[in-house]
Image: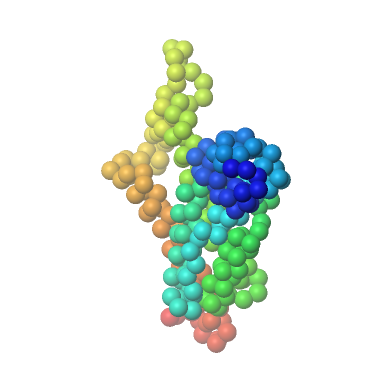
Amino acid sequence: MPRETLNRDQIVQAAIDLLDAEGIDGLSMRKLGRQLGSAPTAMYWHVGNKENLVVLAADRVWGEIERLDPDEVGWRAAARALVHAAHDMTLRHPWLITAVSTHFVYGHGMAGLQDHSYAIYEAAGFTGPDLDWAVNTAFTFLAGAAIDDAVKAAMVRARIRPGRGEDGGPGEDVVTWATGIASQYPRLRARLEAQADLGPAEAARRKFEFGVEAILDGLEARLTAAAGTRDGTDPRSA
């Protein structure tokens, strides 16, 4: 594809596809050029360099997240939907966590998401610094969950733990190795046994849902307490 027929949007979308398949380390202007049928120099012409391209790709995927109007569905439903949609997006694009930890990723995609988050918690009744902290609490939980997902995906990819077995052969499967260590601790062993019949995907889903609802419960409790303070009642007596 000649440089004249390429545009930035095409290149960024192709970069996202490549990042999804191979991660940040697998992204190169040469590979991208082959994918688009164009010379690598055309990539540089439109997006500058790889680092800038990663930033553009990361900011675009933030824009994929569906946003519900809190005035229509209620603040809690909108907040819940936003966190779940953002989590689904990080699962589709696991490279994003690496990108935001190694690049300054900020643009209209991120700004629009932040603005919508403020609209949700503003509709709930948060104001001033509490509004900032409510938005930050939800985002911090999302980031932590995404990092956990990335670590588990890396474990699956690794397959073999570092080092070698006692007989000089390959080490154990990394999941078996980690489970063997955890099983030496009574509380960890008990939880592993209790969750033995629960598949990894279902366990991850339940864990994430628990965290989201716990955060929303806590935020709602703070709103109730603040309302009781304003009208002179003790919210603990309700």
Q: Position of residue 5 (x, y in %)?
A: 61, 49
Q: Quadrant location of the C terminus?
A: bottom left
Q: Where is residue 37 in the image (x, y as percent from the top left)?
A: 57, 39
Task: Judge left or right: residue 24 versus residue 198.
Answer: right
Residue positioned 65% across, 37% down in the render: 40
Q: Which of 106 and 222 is in front in this view?
A: 106
Q: Can residue 117 be seen in this view?
A: yes
Looking at the image, the residue that sits furthest to the top is 167
Q: Which colour scheme is used?
A: rainbow
Q: Position of residue 67 (x, y in %)?
A: 50, 67
Vertically, is 182 above or below 123? above
Q: Which of 100 and 196 is in front in this view?
A: 100
Q: Which of 158 and 196 is in front in this view?
A: 158
Q: Quadrant location of the N terminus?
A: top right
Q: How many marks?
A: 0
Residue positioned 66% across, 59% down in the render: 107
Q: Position of residue 206 (x, y in %)?
A: 37, 54
Q: Nearer the viewer, residue 11 or 215?
A: 11
Residue positioned 43% across, 12% down in the render: 167
Vertically, is 211 above or below 122? above
Task: Judge left or right: residue 195 versus residue 66.
Answer: left
Looking at the image, the residue that sits furthest to the bottom is 231
Residue positioned 40% across, 42% down in the render: 187
Q: Can residue 148 be seen in this view?
A: no
